[in-house]
Amino acid sequence: MLDEEQLAAIETHADRLLEEIGMEIRGDARAIELWRAAGADIDGGVRVRVPAGLAAQIIKRSAPAEFVQHARNPAHSVTIGGRATVFAPAYGPPFVSDLERGRRYGTIEDFRNFVKLTYLTPWLHHSGGTVCEPTDIPVNKRHLDMVYAHMSLSDKPFMGSVTTAERAADSIEMCRILFGAEFIDSHCVILGNVNVNSPLVLDGEASRVIRTYAAANQAPVCVPFILGGAMGPVTTAGGLAQCFAEAMFCVALAQLERPGCPVILGNFLSSISLKSGAPTFGTPEPALAYFAIGQLARRLGVALRCGGNLCASKVPDAQAAYESANSLWPAFLAGANFILHSAGWLEAGLVMSYEKFMMDAEQCGGFHVLGRGMSLDENAFALDAFREVGPGSHFLGCAHTLRNYETAFFNFDLSDNNSFEQWSQEGAHDIVWRANRKWKAMLASYQAPALDSAVREALEAFIVERKATMPDMNH
Amino acid sequence: MLDEEQLAAIETHADRLLEEIGMEIRGDARAIELWRAAGADIDGGVRVRVPAGLAAQIIKRSAPAEFVQHARNPAHSVTIGGRATVFAPAYGPPFVSDLERGRRYGTIEDFRNFVKLTYLTPWLHHSGGTVCEPTDIPVNKRHLDMVYAHMSLSDKPFMGSVTTAERAADSIEMCRILFGAEFIDSHCVILGNVNVNSPLVLDGEASRVIRTYAAANQAPVCVPFILGGAMGPVTTAGGLAQCFAEAMFCVALAQLERPGCPVILGNFLSSISLKSGAPTFGTPEPALAYFAIGQLARRLGVALRCGGNLCASKVPDAQAAYESANSLWPAFLAGANFILHSAGWLEAGLVMSYEKFMMDAEQCGGFHVLGRGMSLDENAFALDAFREVGPGSHFLGCAHTLRNYETAFFNFDLSDNNSFEQWSQEGAHDIVWRANRKWKAMLASYQAPALDSAVREALEAFIVERKATMPDMNH
């Protein structure tokens, strides 16, 4: 953990980047105008130089430290910010894979399957967004099917489209149908995950998407995507300062558009292979940055997105698991409030794996227990058990054990803890084989949560209508 | 992290166990006498009830907060305690396994191979002890061959025998030959890892082994071995208090035998499967206990052994990796000073795996970087790079990148970060395959560190002489 002086040094360097180098907003005159009005210096109509301290000041003035994202099932609404952590599945993979069928392009059927599996697992709080790309639907229409799948197949909170401002608006409009227009103007019901074009560029489409969510009082997640040595410097502190600067710039823009709107400060910082330039995950340098950004976000008073079960491995092997754990542990301990990519991510995010999804989700389950902490009441200290058992005996059948064993330990259902002999007799399978059986059994057991038929019809009518207004397009 | 009141509650409950229930020492009259003289109440000649606070008082009075374990190569001497962490390989497996030959009983050849691999990896500081059981040598003689392997094939620090006090004495005697009798009386050169017979029993042989190491001014590692629900209560706080009580009892005994001797407070706390009773690893409950015992050890002012790359999986798959990371992360962050079982452990410790050893060792390498923390100097903040690159470009060839890239990121050599296409062309191998090739290449490159021929001859003569004094035995 960094001390006051070290944190101030990072903040100072982030401010210097915003003040001296500045950010470019390419093609969004209103965003430029908002920054000019707030006191930034505008150069050439695109370069926004923000006086030191101004971005933090805008954020501290109006951004909520935590907020509730409402789900259509209130039991699944989540608090984002403060001491809470929300797990959401992987986002964006064009490919999917499973043990039998291997690696292939994702389809809307795969998309629906992952929404169903996320609905069924108790360890993911959030349905996520683009759990995989449904490549069998035209790019300009698939957001409607994706949002509808989250709304109809699950009752957990979810994310909307960010590929254009118009698609973001469609996503929000569907929320008006589902939740009511009045409700969503005063309650957060959808997130939009927006990437910065690092280094130091906010694309006009991205800034419009941020403003679209913010204007509707919904939460943009503002995420610099930095591979050290490519979109940022090769040294960790530099990438961290840049990441913090870029994220503050976007979070502040959201607050300028609609003061008080919910917002999440994001961070996606990773390293690259110095042999090939390929992105690498689970390395120690981003972990160090996670701990720092956790402290910085708390000082700023905003919710933080960071980490995930990230890996570069092509298969759900030990490499995938080590790398994933090396990303999730520091994210969780850094106090990340929203952990996207918590389940399924493989191959640097190109693949959503059914088996990895199951393994990762269960890992998130372990962190639920870790987050609750240790009970220190009289029952937990078990003095009665020691009095009953005494030295040299065992606790297997004692009263305290019988009273507590059912809730004592988190059970990793996919782990095999049997003897070598029993495991061999049962076929000597690894965890991927067990995960494969488990996801198929879960999908077979799936039952959709009830959805009011009038709402369903209105959503479907909206989708038909919107699709009719445009030809199929692949961008 | 626990607060003052919570830590005091654990200390109070540990003290209550020592005072009210007491520990039994079964068959070591001198250990009983040491406790009686120190103020404990002795019941029936075996039950030692220690007044609240006495164990901690004895420890605080004379135990060192940190000490140096000297290696025959001074560059490999390690500090144990304080802010340092020392990684040592797995300890005790009767079986070994590798990708081609599968699971089989360990031999002295396997033992020597793991000593060589540990010598060669830069990520393990310590040669460990019983890296696997050399089952092709009689039980009562194998300690001589094991200690000799550590002394002759490596120049890193190591551990000695603990199965009987006589074998512990042999181990120490060999250190007198290697380091000189005078040197070792004032310098720690060997550790002995001693298990408590939890709950609350210290076997007489174990207490004599503790005293043998302590009397020679060498460091006993005092380790309660508690599977919650079996050797301890099923609730975490109870197991933690017990573990702390038992470890304090042994650490204090070492200080009573020789005040000021180096010593390590150990902790091996895990959960069991509630379906089968089998031990489980990588579960969140022991992780919570690790964080607490780290704080307790620092309050007591002694070095802590805790954690490792522990797992229950039968194969080095994703289960093994997740479980291992879930053990190593909390141990490292809890501030464990000596992490035994850092590499190779498989199948609840029954198997030493060549491939898992390679993967784990590299994971330890990542923690070296994490432990060093993040540089926050001007070069790290890279303002010159931002000035050169500006918004919307990339850092791949900029001067700052060229100046820093070689040392920028920790390189996980066993990870494949290539594209799916390249990886497929190269055979679509998983990490276990790559680990298999790597350990064979490392063994092929091994060259023994030089050892003075007179010392070598004296060690060999000692072994021949000791072996001649006893018949082969299997216990």
Image (cartoon, coloured by chain):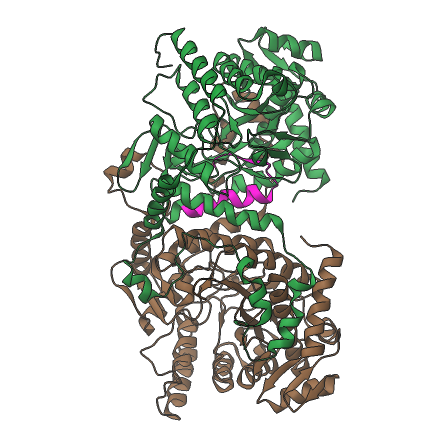
Chain colours: A brown, B green
Q: Residue furthest front?
A: B453
**Rendering coords of residue B332 (x, y %):** 57, 43
Q: Nearer the viewer, residue B401 or A448?
A: B401
**Rendering coords of residue B76 (x, y %):** 56, 35
The residue located at (50%, 64%) in the rendering is A340
Q: Is residue A413 magenta?
A: no
Classify the position of the C terminus of chain A by image quarter.
bottom left
Above or below B265: residue B369: below
The residue located at (50%, 45%) in the rendering is B364
Q: Is residue B334 magenta?
A: yes
**Rendering coords of residue A471 (x, y %):** 36, 92
Above or below A383: residue A417: below
Circle count: 0
Tell me the chief SS of the magenta region.
helix
Q: Nearer the viewer, residue A7 or A236?
A: A236
Q: Is residue A267 visible?
A: no
Above or below B28: residue B51: below
**Rendering coords of residue B242 (x, y %):** 58, 27
The residue located at (35%, 40%) in the rendering is B444
Residues drawn in magenta = B321-341
Q: Is residue B72 visible?
A: yes
